[in-house]
């Protein structure tokens, strides 16, 4: 009796492998396969038989791949579980946001020139003295004949554009004439002072 | 009939994976691993490397499965993932595909074009040879109707309905004959598989 049941299930496995199992048998078999490694092993052997008959090259190593995949999937799931917020991870996330916020402030500071140091960051910025010598016409017109020295003309032009948007000038301009210039009540504010103070406090 | 059946049963497994059943994905792997490895071996000659790429391809599929809507058959989708993974692997390793015949867009075409290749470790190759000899010997000893049914299914890829027409017998008989052939073959290869 039990042998008949087993044979019946094995016949279902065979039809399942061929994609020929009727819907009503399919649900039950899949649930059975889920909890019975013996039937999964039988199914794997049936698949191997087909592979041997078709002379596929890697019929022997298939189980190895399945084992490796199961381990990888396990790791995958535990990784995603780790990423769900727990008490500790919420704290870490908040700390991460704080660090990201500070980093954004630093980047914004660099962009507006607040943390500018001539000696340290002179790689692509014209020095103040050079800027002072640059006339407005030079700022918008590339020096030299571009057609004679095309490669050089590009670099000069890029340098000039950087000079035109120099952060020190921009900051001063915005402090004096910007939308919120009134809030400074006529005082000239150099944000570098605050940066220096902050560094002393550290 | 066969394609629709495969598609329906694969879709059921996909739904189960989406619901969190990892064993259902194992069944999909079990069903298609040989074909996927064979496909990847067209791009990557080294079997160990091909196994790594196959693993990566299946893992990618597993991760992407929640987005799989079932508009195409699972195997077609998996086949494309495998090709892309193999190509990316070659690009990362700065190598060209081994076999340009593998530039086939549809899995059905690949089945037609696939040739016989032998590549494995010495132990695996020896075991493969033993398996092959055993299967060939057993199949030669099978009654005619069982041998014809299994050959039409596994080698010629015919559906049960087509086999029923060829063999002029009911669908249930085809199912039973194919199973009995597998049962006999399984009995003969089991000692080798258990050894390995």
Image: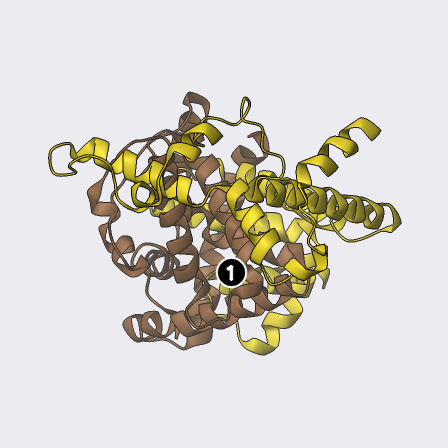
Residue A91 lies, in percent from the top left, at 84, 47
Q: Colour of chain A?
A: yellow
Residue B110 lies, in percent from the top left, at 28, 53
Examine the rendered structure and indicate whether residue B128 appears above or below residue B174: above
Q: Residue at x 33, y 39 (%)?
A: A158
Q: Say which of B55 and B31 sits in front.
A: B55
Q: Say which of A122 and B125 sits in front.
A: A122
Position of B181 with respect to A80 (left or right) is left
Position of B44 with respect to B62 (left or right) is left
Q: Residue at x 47, y 41 (%)?
A: A166
Q: Which chain is brown in the picture?
A: B
Q: Say which of B144 and A85 sits in front.
A: A85
Residue lying furthest left: A148
Residue A162 lies, in percent from the top left, at 40, 40
Q: Quadrant of the C terminus of chain B?
A: top right
Position of B49 with respect to A81 (left or right) is left
The quarter of the displayed image where residue A6 is located: bottom right
The quarter of the displayed image where residue A160 is located: top left
Position of A177 with respect to A190 (left or right) is left
Please report, as a chain letter, where disc 1 is located.
A
Q: Residue at x 23, y 39 (%)?
A: B99
Q: How many marks?
A: 1
Q: Is residue A101 visible?
A: yes
Element class at badge 1:
helix
How many C-alpha atoms fall within 10 Å of the one at disc 1: few (<14), some, or many (≥20)?
Answer: many
Q: Residue at x 78, y 32 (%)?
A: A197
Residue lying furthest right: A87
What residue is disc 1 on? A14
């Amino acid at each position: 009796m039990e042998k008949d049941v087993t044979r019946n299930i094995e016949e279902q496995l065979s039809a399942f492998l061929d994609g020929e199992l009727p819907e009503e048998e399919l649900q039950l078999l899949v649930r059975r396969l889920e909890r019975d490694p013996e039937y999964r092993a039988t199914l794997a052997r049936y698949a191997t038989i087909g592979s041997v008959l078709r002379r596929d090259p890697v019929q022997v190593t298939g189980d190895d791949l399945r084992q490796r995949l199961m381990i990888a999937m396990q790791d995958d799931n535990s990784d995603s579980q780790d990423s769900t917020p727990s008490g500790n991870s919420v704290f870490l996330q908040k700390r991460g946001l704080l660090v990201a916020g500070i980093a954004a402030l630093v980047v914004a500071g660099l962009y507006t020139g607040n943390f500018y140091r001539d000696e340290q960051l002179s790689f692509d910025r014209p020095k103040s003295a050079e800027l002072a010598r640059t006339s407005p016409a030079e700022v918008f017109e590339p020096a030299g004949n571009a057609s004679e020295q095309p490669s050089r003309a590009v670099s000069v032009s890029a340098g000039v554009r950087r000079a035109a948007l120099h952060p020190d000038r921009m900051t001063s301009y915005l402090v004096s004439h910007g939308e919120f210039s009134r809030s400074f009540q006529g005082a000239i504010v150099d944000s570098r002072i605050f940066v220096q103070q902050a560094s002393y406090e550290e | 009939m066969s394609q629709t059946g495969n598609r329906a049963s694969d879709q059921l497994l996909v739904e189960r994976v989406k619901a969190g059943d990892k064993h259902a994905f194992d069944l999909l792997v079990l069903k298609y691993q040989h074909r996927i490895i064979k496909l990847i071996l067209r791009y990557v000659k080294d079997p160990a490397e091909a196994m790594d790429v196959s693993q990566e391809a299946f893992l990618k599929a597993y991760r992407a499965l929640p987005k799989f809507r079932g508009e195409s058959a699972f195997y077609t989708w998996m086949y494309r993932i495998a090709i892309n993974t193999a190509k990316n692997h070659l690009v990362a390793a700065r190598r060209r595909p081994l076999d340009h015949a593998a530039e086939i867009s549809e899995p059905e075409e690949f089945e037609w074009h696939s040739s016989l290749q032998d590549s494995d470790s010495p132990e695996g190759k020896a075991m493969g040879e033993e398996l092959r000899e055993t299967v060939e010997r057993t199949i030669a000893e099978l009654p005619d109707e069982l041998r014809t049914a299994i050959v039409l299914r596994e080698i010629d890829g015919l559906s049960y309905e087509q086999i029923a027409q060829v063999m002029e017998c009911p669908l249930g008989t085809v199912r039973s004959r194919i199973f009995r052939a597998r049962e006999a073959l399984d009995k003969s290869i089991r000692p080798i598989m258990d050894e390995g």
